[in-house]
Amino acid sequence: MSDTSARDLDSSPTSAGSAARRKTGNGRERASKPKPDLFFNRELSWLDFNARVLAEASNPVNPLLERLKFLAIFSNNLDEFFMIHVPGMWDRDEEEAALPSNQSSIQANLKAIKQKVEPMLEIQHRCFDEILSQLTAYGVRLLKHTELSDAQKTALASYFDREVFPVLTPLAVDPGHPFPYISNLSLSLAVVVHDPRTGRQRFARVKVPARTVLPRLVPIPGEKWHFILLEEVIAAHIGRLFTGMEVTACYPFRLTRDADLELAEEAADDLLEMIEEELAKRRFGEIVRLEIAKSVPDVMRQTILGELKEVSENEVFYIEGPLNMADFFGLVGLNIPELHDPPFAPGIPAVLKQSEDIFAAIRQGDILLHHPYQAFQSVADFFRSAAEDPHVLAIKHTLYRTSGDSPILEALIAAADAGKQVACVVELKSRFDEENNITWAKQLEKSGVHVVYGLIGLKTHCKVTLVVRREEDGLRRYVHVGTGNYNPKTAAVYTDVGILTCNPAFGEDATDLFNFLTGYAHQEKYRKFLVAPVTLRRKLEALVVRETDLHTPEKPGRILATMNALVDPTLIKLLYAASEKGVQIDLIIRGMCCLKPGVPGLSENIRVMSIVGRFLEHSRIFYFRNGGDEEVYIGSADWMTRNLDRRVEVVVPVTDRSILRNLHDNVLCVLLKDNCQAWDLQPDGKYIRRHPLPGHHRNSTQEALLETLTS
């Protein structure tokens, strides 16, 4: 789900020249690839995840507006899939993708994608109709222009003349007017007009203004929750744009383009300036999808396809119902309490409740934070206290994604204003948050914060904050390490964990990490931190191998892990080897999973499940039994090649035994027992939803944690 949700579901980056490779099928020499039969296709696996999101929209157990929310998330996820994942097929390392590099295989993959997406679109349409039908009982209606009263039509005609007509631009298509360039995700109307003077048919395109210009869902005057789509309003008055002509047809269509940035970072004099320039090009990437109304006649369809010469049939999707259902997020916020999930008040760890001094509370012992069940406000308070405390000398922070009104960044600005040393590593390449991060970077710099943009060729994805405080016995370092972004908005809907600590080894490692990020340090060793691309891969592989080696019938091996995606071939092969030895492995993978579980002789001791529910499962927690000396790690990295080799990630061991026990018993084991939102991955790639057996209780992980952790 996007975060929107699914903004942590991106694929490995494409590079300059991808368009040329797509057309010719040529590519750079690849490393030897693993056998494809060992792995599920990653694109199809990602689509399976989105199918589980769609299942939540279809689930009558969910309140109506929550079902509509899942429908909008599904649509938004598909947009991102086609903008990022599909273009990435042409330029991804084969070692990660497990795909042949020739062009015919790419086309076969596109065909398989289309075959999987088309039935999902039909389900989406049926689900949308069902939700709309049931919403009428609550006074919510989406109307056609033909369903309006004369008075309402008159009022909308006035609205069209006053607000809509002035911003529309009809674009003719003829020898004197070439087919217009259509930007990414723009909704258009294909219009056929008849010239009564010549008797000829003409084709034109009218762009439907984006929702940042005009609302897609236009309120109908005189009705509280009645709406009409903006394109319906335009279509009803389309003749106003073509004076003296007869409009004979009008159909919506929409293009999706390759939206991944193509960055040659090594050649950049100014990374911020280069990314600003590349962002301006994002709307003009290569076409990867054409959505068109299913009702479009063949002649019109052929006209559009003829003008968009580079679009193949595998990239065309015929849509019944409205295009771009992500815009229906606009209805999700309607104030009808019974159509929403019950509200809840996030809890606060007892030690923080009992202490007015957050630093004194941390000195008592490490503190586990579990969002959204526990308030992200505790993290914000950590920053606010650091900014206000006169004993705090320095704050260092990594920023990957945040909100437009971040209390954390406001605290950093306040700290800089107070004369403290403040440094912020801003990741400008955080996909679809680039503009927001650029805005914050400039504001932070103006306020005296030392801003750096990370390392050339690597994304800084880790979630680490360091606070240096002078105390009676000398300087003490306080650290926050988390699995999720420092974003108060997504923290309300993403499940993540974090730890507040003043463990000296963590403080020293955090200091070394920031020296690595902001200076020229070649840091190759850390005390506790596992840092990608330096030590994380090697350590994770060693942990799996160790669990395999320690396994005996008397002391059986055990691996438990929850993460967003499992794609890395090397780690998957090591898990297969552990399974063959007899190690029992349970993996809770929300999204993409290329590992095949339950295959005799390969992975019969591996089980994979996915949980999709009210909150987006986002935590990365890794448990190893280690012969009885249990270890748990948390951090920012999924088990994907990009995370281990091409990003700066931080994973840390949980050194407090009570927190370790809590994460194992009350998080991982609770997740495994879920029989409401859980889906089991089968050896053939299908997911089967769990249901409570007759006579058994419902076990919903998210409901259980809401009961135990909230106030």
Image (cartoon, rainbow, N blue to C red):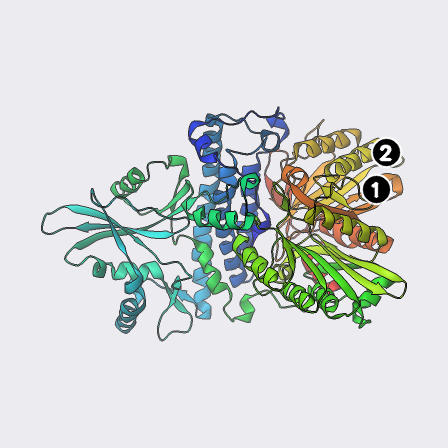
Q: How crowded is mark 1: few (under 14 residues within 10 Å), some or many (20 or more)?
A: some
In the orientation shown, which residue stands out farthest toward the bottom? 222
- Residue at the spot 76% in from the left edge and 42% down from the top edge: 523
Q: Nearer the viewer, residue 525 or 349?
A: 525
Residue sitting nearer the eye, 84 or 526: 526
Task: Specify the amino acid type for callout 1.
Answer: Arg
Query: Is 149 on the left or on the right of 524, as rendered?
Result: left
Q: Position of residue 464 (x, y in %)?
A: 72, 53
| Apparent side of residue 187 relative to residue 177 in the rendered image (left or right) | right
Q: Is residue 700 visible?
A: no
Residue 612 seen in render:
yes
Image spot of residue 260 (x, y percent): 50, 43
Give 610 or 324, whichever is nearer the viewer.
Answer: 324
Task: Using the numbered discs, state the Cα–Cα distance from disc 1 to disc 2 in whole angstroms.
Answer: 9 Å
Query: Residue 625: which disc?
Result: 1
For badge 2, the amino acid type reads Leu
Q: Position of residue 298 (x, y in %)?
A: 27, 41
Task: Say whether residue 385 is left or right of residue 564.
Answer: right
Q: Are marks 1 and 2 in contact (CB under 8 Å)?
A: yes
Query: In the structure shown, which secondary structural element does the residue marked by tag 1 occupy?
Result: loop
Image quarter where the C terminus lies is bottom right
In terms of secondary structure, where does tag 2 sit?
helix
Task: Tell me which residue sits at (21%, 61%) in the image.
Answer: 240
Q: In this view, does 407 lie to the left or right of 230?
A: right
Among numbered discs 1 and 2, the one appearing first in the sequence: 2
Q: Which percent across, then down, holds residue 571? A: 70, 34
Residue 40's place in the image compared with 513, above or below, is: above
Label 2 Cα neighbours within 10 Å, binned few <14 / some 14-19 / many ≥20: some
Q: Name the residue under label 2.
A: 550
Residue at the image position 82 percent from the left and 55 percent from the top: 659
